[in-house]
Image (tube, rainbow, N blue to C red):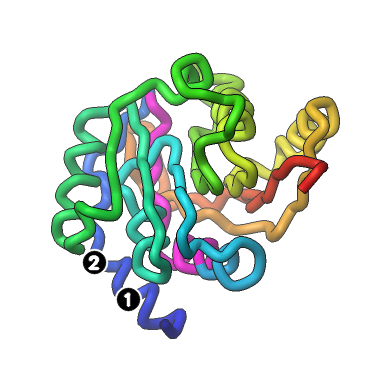
Amino acid sequence: MKLKKFEGLLNEIELLKKPKLYLEQYNTSSHIVAQIINTIHTRFDNFDNKLIGDFGTGSGIFLIAASLIANCKCVGFDIDEDALQVASDNISEFNMNDKIDLIKADVTMLDATLNIQRKPFDIIVMNPPFGTKNNKGLDMKFLSVACKLASRVYSLHKTSTREHIIKFAQQNGLKIKILSQIQFDIPSSYEFHRQDSVDIEVDFIRVWNRNQ
């Protein structure tokens, strides 16, 4: 599928209309998602016949994108019932109920409830909370759990935290590569926002086990 057509299909996905500040919910644009999913699938880890996870799935856009270009099975986790309803509606609109499952769960507790010895997911792709506001460090909790549950993790993190994330990988015997630096456009979503949108520098990273 050509990238332009791929992005066009993702534009049809309903985004979260009322993101929740306390959960640090921000919609990821179809342009960024198309670039990320296409890059992973064509350059690093083919999604075909893989089990794909998404932590903090929101509208479900990452998993729908993966399912559009590959024959894969996907599971999205989110703690927010409203987000899960939006994701469920989107999945139904794309006729992907047989390919994508949704689970309400606290992502930071998943390593205590799932079998981390066999790493149930082949790949996790996520845009976790950035770990600011009242959730300092939440981004690292998401990343830590993801690395316990998947062989390869692709994630978005504020560029300002790069050194901290590299140190985390080194301390946990993981390999890490900064695949690209992205201008993440966050549109005005909350009452305190005084601009129509803000660009934040974000790293698109790949983390995997050293023995792979």
Q: CA distance from mark 2 to mark 1?
A: 7 Å
Q: Residue at x 71, y 44 (%)?
A: 208
- Whether residue 131 is visible: no
Q: Position of residue 68 (x, y in %)?
A: 35, 68
Dot 1: element? helix
Q: Residue at x 66, y 64 (%)?
A: 44
- The span picked out in magenta is 23-37
Q: Nearer the viewer, residue 140 or 186?
A: 140
Query: Callout 1, which amino acid?
Result: Gly
Q: Residue at x 58, y 39 (%)?
A: 150
Dividing the picture into quarters, in which one does residue 93 lie?
bottom left
Q: Are marks 2 and 1 in contact (CB under 8 Å)?
A: yes
Q: Residue at x 71, y 58 (%)?
A: 179
Secondary structure mostly seen in the magenta stretch: helix
Q: Which mark is residue 8?
A: 1
Q: Position of residue 46 (x, y in %)?
A: 56, 65
- Whether residue 47 is visible: yes
Examine the structure image and report whether residue 120 is included in the region drawn in magenta: no
Query: Callout 2, which amino acid?
Result: Glu
Q: Which residue corresponds to mark 2?
A: 12
Q: Is residue 203 above or below residue 82?
A: below
